């Protein structure tokens, strides 16, 4: 019997085989736990994290409103790094709820993906 998390990890590996980020268009990776939501901007060519944000660092609740604040924070960090376009890696999660709120807020701030 496979667990929900094992199925998610299988989807994540399948997605990661197809997408990759470069310096001009980095990958935005999302990790969602029960207690927090985390995002990272990753340059896969060099294997470095360019910027990160989380509900834990911002001190917000990990709900939809908190996800919007995390999205706004990472979008402002992208602007300071002069990044306008990203590749969105939802990490195997459904594009729904907190993940969708995060993405919508980043789009509202001017990021393209």
Image: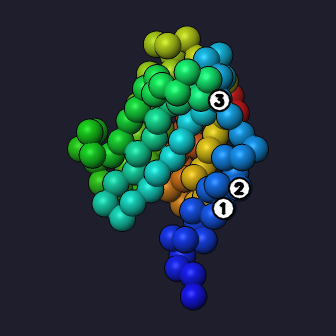
> Which residue carries the number 1 mark?
11
Mark 2 and mark 3 in contact? Answer it, CB < 8 Å.
no
Work out whether 55 lies above or below 2.
above
Residue 94 visible from this viewpoint: no
Q: Give the camera-side residue of 60 and 56.
A: 56
Residue at mark 2 to residue at mark 3: CA–CA distance: 16 Å
> Which residue carries the number 2 mark?
14
Measuring 64% from the left and 55% from the top, which residue is drawn there? 13
Is residue 18 shown left or right of residue 75? right
Alpha-carbon neighbours of circle 3 within 10 Å: few (<14), some, or many (≥20)? many
Is residue 8 shown left or right of residue 36? right
> Which residue carries the number 3 mark?
21
Q: Quadrant of residue 54?
A: top left
Measuring 60% from the left and 50% from the top, which residue is drawn there? 90
Mark 1 and mark 2 in contact? Answer it, CB < 8 Å.
yes
Q: Give the camera-side residue of 99 and 48.
A: 48
Determine whether the residue tagged by mark 3 lies in a helix, strand or loop. Answer: loop
From this viewpoint, which residue is outermost toward the left? 59
| Circle nearer the N terminus (3, 1) | 1
């Amino acid at each position: 019997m496979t667990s929900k998390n094992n199925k998610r990890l299988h989807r994540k590996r399948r997605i990661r085989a197809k997408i990759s980020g470069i310096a001009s268009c980095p990958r935005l990776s999302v990790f969602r736990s029960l207690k927090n939501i985390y995002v990272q901007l990753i340059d896969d060519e060099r294997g470095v994290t360019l910027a990160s944000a989380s509900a834990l660092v911002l001190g917000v609740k990990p709900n939809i409103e908190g996800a919007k604040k995390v999205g706004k924070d990472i979008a402002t960090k992208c602007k300071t790094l002069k990044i306008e376009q990203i590749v969105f890696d939802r990490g195997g999660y459904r594009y729904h709820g907190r993940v969708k709120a995060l993405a919508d807020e980043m789009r509202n701030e001017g990021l393209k993906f």
